[in-house]
Image (cartoon, rainbow, N blue to C red):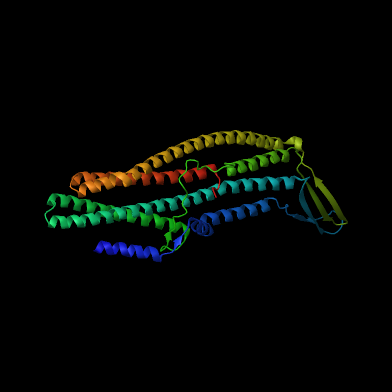
């Protein structure tokens, strides 16, 4: 009686709680995501650093003062004061701004992969919970059905139609089923709490689960794959090409100055220019070589990465197709049990043609197949969202 009341309360709780969809979970999670906020702040930080590095050099103010003691005449103080400014030539400042901007864009593309991985992780958690929910409902139906049989057999024992041993075996099976029911109920609760914790939604809500992805062997979205990796590579390669152009000339800047000198018997005004002698240093040449070598290394690393990604993609697709075939095989086997074997063994047992051991073994084998079926569904969805993360493409 107490267990029946438990089921009624659980059903009422499910009806009173509002159901939330996968889309609602993703929206809430991304609006409140610490990861998204961290990426946004890091982007602002890089933009501020970019502006600081490309700002013009400040004017420099310098001066001197001295005491003059001439051999003839009066003593006096002499002083000089001036300003200087380092001036970048041509479009070097713009080139450096473009280089930094491209690098920042490449970093942002790489960070978007992290966000995509987070969202696919949430999708996986949602599907894992929905399967836990299906498992709980399946075990609950099995328990309720077996409970009815047990109550019927209790009456049969009262009229001495079955033995005490048979009733005890049925009772042991009933208790094991109830323990399994409590276990799957606990797992369902944990998976729901884990999901809601990330989504920042109220914990009294249930999942809609009508929007889970269909199990499909051809689950790979069409279109361009690895978009973030490719975009980051293009941005970094373009920045290195601009860096090669940036150091193509050794004359990068000149320093201009203006100075006023106050001497004992005159005022002096002067203009000056300081030009670095590029032939006395190999700095620009070495910087240019550095960019060329980096460009070559980046290209080779990208080629290696893309080969590895394609190999991993082929492996994931193959494993996914095998998983779909296994799930379909288990589905057909379960259907055969439900439509033919279970009704047949029920009828045979109730008619006294089969023993309680045969009946229990058939029921246990059916539940084992169910567990295997749901376990493979969980594995399928885990692999599916790994695939979506791997190809770096939003499936919807």
Of residues 288 and 353, the one drawn nearer to the viewer in this rendering: 353
Q: Report the residue at 25% width, 64% height from top.
A: 2
Is residue 171 found left or right of 332 in the rendered image? Answer: left
Q: Quadrant of the N terminus?
A: bottom left
Question: How far from the left and from the top, in percent, is residue 84?
Answer: 77, 52
Residue 368 can be seen in this image: no
Residue 152 can be seen in this image: yes
Of residues 357 and 101, the one drawn nearer to the viewer in this rendering: 357
Of residues 43 and 7, the one drawn nearer to the viewer in this rendering: 7
Of residues 359 and 209, the one drawn nearer to the viewer in this rendering: 359
Is residue 106 found left or right of 194 in the rendered image? Answer: right
Q: Report the residue at 25% width, 44% height from top.
A: 362
Question: How far from the left and from the top, in percent, is residue 389?
Answer: 51, 45
Is residue 194 found left or right of 360 in the rendered image? Answer: right
Would you place residue 384 above or below residue 138 in this image?
above
**How many labels were placed on the picture?**
0
Q: Report the residue at 30% width, 45% height from top.
A: 366
- Extreme residue toward the right, this view: 266
- Extreme residue toward the left, this view: 160
Is residue 174 found left or right of 317 in the rendered image? Answer: left
Question: How far from the left and from the top, in percent, is residue 64?
Answer: 76, 55
């Amino acid at each position: 009686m107490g267990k029946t009341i438990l089921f009624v309360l659980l059903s009422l709780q499910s009806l009173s709680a509002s159901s939330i969809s996968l889309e609602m979970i993703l929206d809430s999670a991304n609006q409140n995501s610490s990861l998204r906020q961290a990426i946004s702040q890091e982007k602002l930080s890089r933009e501020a650093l970019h502006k600081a590095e490309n700002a013009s050099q400040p004017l420099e103010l310098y001066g001197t003062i001295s005491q003059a003691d001439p051999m003839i005449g009066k003593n006096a103080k002499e002083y000089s004061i001036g300003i200087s400014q380092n001036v970048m030539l041509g479009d070097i400042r713009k080139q450096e701004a473009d280089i930094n901007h491209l690098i920042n864009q490449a970093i942002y593309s790489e960070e978007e992969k992290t966000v995509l991985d987070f969202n696919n992780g949430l999708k996986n958690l949602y599907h894992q919970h929905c399967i836990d929910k299906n498992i709980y409902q399946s075990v609950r139906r099995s328990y309720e059905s077996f409970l009815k049989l047990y109550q019927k057999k209790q009456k049969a024992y009262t009229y001495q139609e079955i033995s005490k041993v048979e009733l005890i075996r049925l009772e042991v099976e009933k208790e094991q089923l109830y323990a399994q029911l409590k276990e799957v109920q606990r797992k369902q609760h944990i998976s729901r709490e884990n999901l809601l914790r990330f989504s920042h939604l109220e914990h009294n809500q249930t999942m809609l689960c009508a929007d889970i992805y269909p199990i499909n062997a051809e689950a790979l979205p069409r279109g361009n794959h690895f978009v973030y990796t490719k975009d980051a590579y293009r941005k970094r390669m373009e920045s290195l090409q601009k860096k090669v152009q940036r150091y193509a000339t050794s004359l990068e800047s000149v320093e201009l100055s203006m100075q006023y000198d106050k001497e004992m018997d005159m005022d002096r005004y002067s203009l000056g220019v300081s030009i670095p002698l590029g032939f006395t240093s190999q700095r620009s040449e070495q910087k240019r070589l550095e960019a060329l070598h980096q460009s070559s290394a980046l290209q080779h690393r990208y080629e290696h990465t893309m080969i590895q990604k394609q190999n991993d993609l082929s492996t994931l697709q193959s494993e996914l197709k095998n998983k779909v075939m296994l799930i379909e095989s288990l589905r057909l086997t379960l259907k055969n049990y439900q439509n033919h074997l279970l009704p047949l063994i029920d009828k045979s047992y109730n008619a006294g043609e089969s023993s309680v051991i045969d009946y229990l073994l058939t029921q246990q084998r059916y539940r084992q197949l169910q567990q295997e079926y749901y376990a493979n569904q969980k594995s399928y969805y885990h692999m599916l969202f790994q695939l979506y993360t791997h190809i770096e493409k939003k499936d919807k």
